[in-house]
């Protein structure tokens, strides 16, 4: 398993871990208000940490001086990134236009209003979706390929 | 200049024209005439002009019987698409976070922000895609026929 695959697995693990934490909070006996739980999803911003520090402190990667990314790896990452952004563009209009239509349909007077926190949830959801799709796509492409991705 | 470059120029010009006209219209309606914002923002309708950019594929038709697209063209197009989508993703993220940080978490904003964010992100995607294609080929390079 190469560095790219390890990073992909790490990201999927972080997303799943945080999703489980959110689900546990949501269905716990305390039953906090829904908005507080959604605010708890702010933990998802932790996803940026592996991206920022590039993981070396946590996982022993390839030895220095070796070629760690070749043409095929670059193509896999590029294809996964394109698929992730593509998925984002399929999903992004749903909250944008859906909320617009929903809020306007049920408003009593004037212009429909939403909390600014809702927008942060849309942005956060976008980050999670892109990260997840990109990581899963990378893992799937290496699985489907001829080699196991080792360098 | 090949077909992809011509289409990229076409797209970039129409998006630029729409954006500039919309900015002028909104500025005139809001600052010069003094209309309230909900009415002045109607000037954003000029962004519709950007839609003419989509006619590029009909205007610049494929040459029949010729190989019009090779590996390099596909690579350039893929890279430009990722750049376009990436930029739009960033714009969408920034515009979603902006009200939260500027107005605060307790603030409420008009729901019309949402389609505006979607439109801004879409225009960014197409514009950056076009500019990235032109930049990769070289703005005026003649050897890409």
Image (tube, coloured by chain):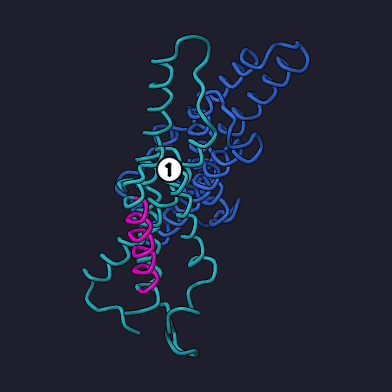
Rate crowding at label 1 as few (under 14), some (14 to 19) or many (20 or more) other CA atoms within 10 Å. Answer: some
* Residue range of the region highlighted in magenta in the rendering: A6-22
Task: Please say if B137 is above or below A119.
Answer: below
The residue lying toward the viewer, choosing from A31 and A96, is A31
Q: Colour of chain B?
A: blue
Q: Position of residue B74 (x, y in %)?
A: 39, 56
On whether residue A50 falls in the magenta region, the answer is no
For the stretch drawn in magenta, the main secondary structure is helix
Report which quarter residue B21 is drawn in: top right
Report which quarter residue B46 is drawn in: top right
Identify which residue is drawn at 31% across, 44% down.
B64
Identify which residue is drawn at 67% across, 20% down.
B26
- Secondary structure of the residue carrying tag 1 is helix
The residue lying toward the viewer, choosing from B56 and B19, is B19
Report which quarter residue B56 is drawn in: top left
> Badge 1 is on which residue?
A38
| Chain that appears cyan | A
- Tell me: B126 left or right of B44: left
Q: Position of residue A122 (x, y in %)?
A: 45, 40
Quick one: which residue is furthest to the right in this view?
A: B32
Quick one: which residue is furthest to the front in this view?
A: A29
């Amino acid at each position: 398993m190469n560095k790219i695959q390890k990073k992909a697995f790490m990201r999927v693990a972080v997303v799943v871990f945080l999703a489980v934490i959110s689900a546990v909070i949501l269905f716990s006996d305390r039953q906090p208000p829904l908005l507080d739980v959604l605010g708890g999803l702010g933990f998802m911003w932790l996803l940026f940490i592996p991206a920022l520090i590039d993981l070396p402190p946590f996982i022993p990667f390839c030895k220095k001086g070796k070629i760690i990314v070749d043409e095929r790896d670059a193509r896999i990452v590029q294809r996964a990134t394109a698929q992730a952004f593509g998925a984002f563009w399929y999903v992004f209009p749903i909250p944008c236009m859906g909320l617009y239509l929903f809020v306007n349909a049920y408003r009593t007077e004037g212009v429909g209003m939403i909390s600014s926190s809702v927008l942060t949830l849309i942005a956060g959801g976008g980050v999670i979706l892109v990260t997840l799709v990109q990581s899963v796509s990378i893992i799937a492409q290496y699985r489907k390929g001829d080699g196991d991705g080792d360098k | 200049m090949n077909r992809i470059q011509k289409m990229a120029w076409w797209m970039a010009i129409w998006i630029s024209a729409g954006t500039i006209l919309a900015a002028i219209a909104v500025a005139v309606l809001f600052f010069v005439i003094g209309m309230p914002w909900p009415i002045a923002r109607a000037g954003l309708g000029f962004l519709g002009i950007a839609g003419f950019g989509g006619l590029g594929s009909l205007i610049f038709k494929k040459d029949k019987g010729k190989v019009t697209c090779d590996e390099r063209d596909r690579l350039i197009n893929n890279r430009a698409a990722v750049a376009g989508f990436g930029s739009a993703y960033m714009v969408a993220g920034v515009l979603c976070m902006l009200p939260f940080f500027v107005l605060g978490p307790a603030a409420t904003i008009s729901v019309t922000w949402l389609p505006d964010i979607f439109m801004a992100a879409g225009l960014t995607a197409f514009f950056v895609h076009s500019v990235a294609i032109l930049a990769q080929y070289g703005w005026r390079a003649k050897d890409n026929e």
